[in-house]
Amino acid sequence: MADIIELLPDSIANQIAAGEVIQRPSSAVKELLENAVDADATEIKLIIADAGKSLVSVIDNGKGMSETDARMAFERHATSKIKKIDDLFSIKTMGFRGEALASIAAVAQVELKTKKHDDELGTFIEVENSQVVKQEPCAAANGTTISMKNLFFNVPARRNFLKSNAAEMKHIVDEFIRVAMAFPEIFFSLTSNGQQVFYLEAGNIKQRVIQILGNNYNTKLVTVKEQTDYMNIYGFVGKPEAAKKTRGDQYFFVNNRFIKSAYLNHAVNTAFENMIAKDSFPSYVLFIDLDPSQIDINVHPTKQEIKFEDEKIIYAFVQAAVKHALAQFSIAPSLDFTLNADIQQLDAVAKPFTTEKREAASSSNLYKTFTGKYQAHKIEPNEKSELSHWKDFFTKKENKAEQTIEQKPISPEIPTLHSLSKFNNTYIQLHNTYIIVANTTGFMLVHQQHAHERVLYEKFTEQSHSTHPATQKSLFPITLELAISDAVLLEELLPEIMALGYQIENFGNNTFIIQGTPADVIQGNEKHSIELLLEQFKHFSSDIKFSKREKLVRCMSRQHAIKAGNPLLQKEMQTLIENLFQCTTPNVTPSGNPTYLEFKEDYLDRMFGKI
């Protein structure tokens, strides 16, 4: 039998390796920007065409490369960062993978122009399909310019998997922000299709944060700064009023490398406990510096997830640093231990504590209870006390009338609108959240927010498939100015948002004009509605693969539903109930939560022991 195992040709092996490193244009952006930072550049320019599919070019004024280094940079496993295995655990630079340029050259056409500061001439290299097509001396500015053209030109299947230009551009902006945020001392710019998207002057961390996240953060940032022998934490957290209903602007950097960490995110959230609503999320840009030997950054291909040697210490430091910052700026509640002058005049304070008083106090039951070991919970028996027979509550024999009432699940038989008994159109609202509705077989307990969410979901779904969605024109057009990353996202979502009934125009410079809103949306807060819609969309559960339109419909129905806690008039309750039972699926929200619970008459009878 012939042998069947063969070594892969280099061209195929390179393309497979490239698939691990370069998944989309933003992957190349990350690698090239990090290489420019490591080259000690003070100016880095990113130029994009066709969302990176046609061109990704990074220009830096760093130290450049010699002719030999320029050629070697395209070899697999080539790096200047690692000499021995121990170096893997003490890396302080950004790009060190050793396969970035080789991977890019395997799936794109690459041109490199580089020159060291002391050299008269630079080097030009052109690579295609991992093969050097041209190498020659050239006139060049100090530093390196590397251009990646026609990504996946030789792997059409991979190119077909790329998303729309707007979606790919959003990924590029995300990677650009993560690198630019970490190095505020470097000038960064981003130009897309000839239009300038970012122009970030070199400055301090606060200036860079405001440049990227927007001027509205100028007065909403609290400084975090703690230094210890083990680690340093510095950066900013947003004041409680800057908290968002979704995970908004949250950035963690470890040794200047952006990371994702649900564990550390939890540490920040707990520091904000009782200062923001439970369904809100704080904003933060936090940097952690510690010995590279204390972390392992090789647990994820993109280096966005890292492993700490002692993550509990890191958690405690982060939580304490944020709490301290909030307390320092008089945001967190603090205890005042100074004694009020009026209190000092009271008899209990002013008069001496005599021997007789001390003996009387120490002989009391209360004193014994709190000074006896393990006795803080003790309750002295007292014939007159109502607690003397507390055990009887648990020892009485159970009978049908005393059995625990179990919640009855939603009946699979969905009531119809005709089965509702309106009792002169009277509805009872409970805790401004639930509506009690009588029907012919008992009653239903309707959750007003869940019910309205279902109603809006079906309306918005129907509207999104209409050729002429119902729109109410704004009396005065509203100007909406967004952070750059949000502007890129809104541009991507405009077709779907317009299909829902919004009329929005791109006015340039990250500004949009809102001309109209869907007919079912209450006017008056259009700017906030769009901002919240973008936030919710960004953090929609990625576990479920919904279309963009479906995600938007779900976000909008959740956003505009009547909230729990809102009092309703009789007419409003009646309209909501009637609309709910005209829905195709009235018993659950789009996410699967029940909109009502039904209590049937025979079930009620059993509860009260009548059967």
Image (cartoon, rainbow, N blue to C red):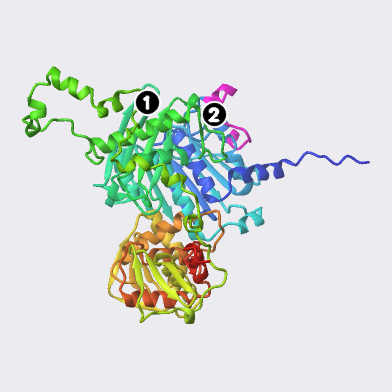
Query: Residue, x 41% and y 62% (percent of image)?
Result: 490
The 10 Å Cα crowd at callout 1, few under 14, some 14 to 19, many 20 or more, is few
Residue 116 position, x and y percent, is: 47, 32
Whether residue 248 appears in magenta in the rendering, the answer is no
* Quarter in which the N terminus is drawn: top right
Which of the two discs, 1 and 2, sits closer to the camera? Answer: 1
Q: Is residue 213 visible?
A: yes
Looking at the image, which residue sits at the far top? 355
Q: Going by the image, does 170 lie left or right of 300?
A: left
Magenta region: which residues? 71-89
Question: Which residue in the structure is indicated by mark 2?
Answer: 80
Amino acid marked by disc 1: Tyr
**Residue 230 versus residue 477: which sits nearer the camera?**
230
Residue 180, compared with residue 198, is above or below; it is above
Outermost residue on the right side: it is: 1
**Measured from the top left, where is residue 588 in percent x and y?**
50, 66
Q: Which mark is residue 48?
A: none
Q: Residues within 10 Å of mark 2 (few under 14, many from 20)?
A: few
Whole-percent x, y for residue 585 in the image: 53, 72
Write down the quadrant of residue 386 in the picture.
top left
Main SS type for the magenta part? loop
Question: Pointer 1: what residue?
Answer: 374
Compare marks 1 and 2 and give the one earlier in the sequence.
Answer: 2
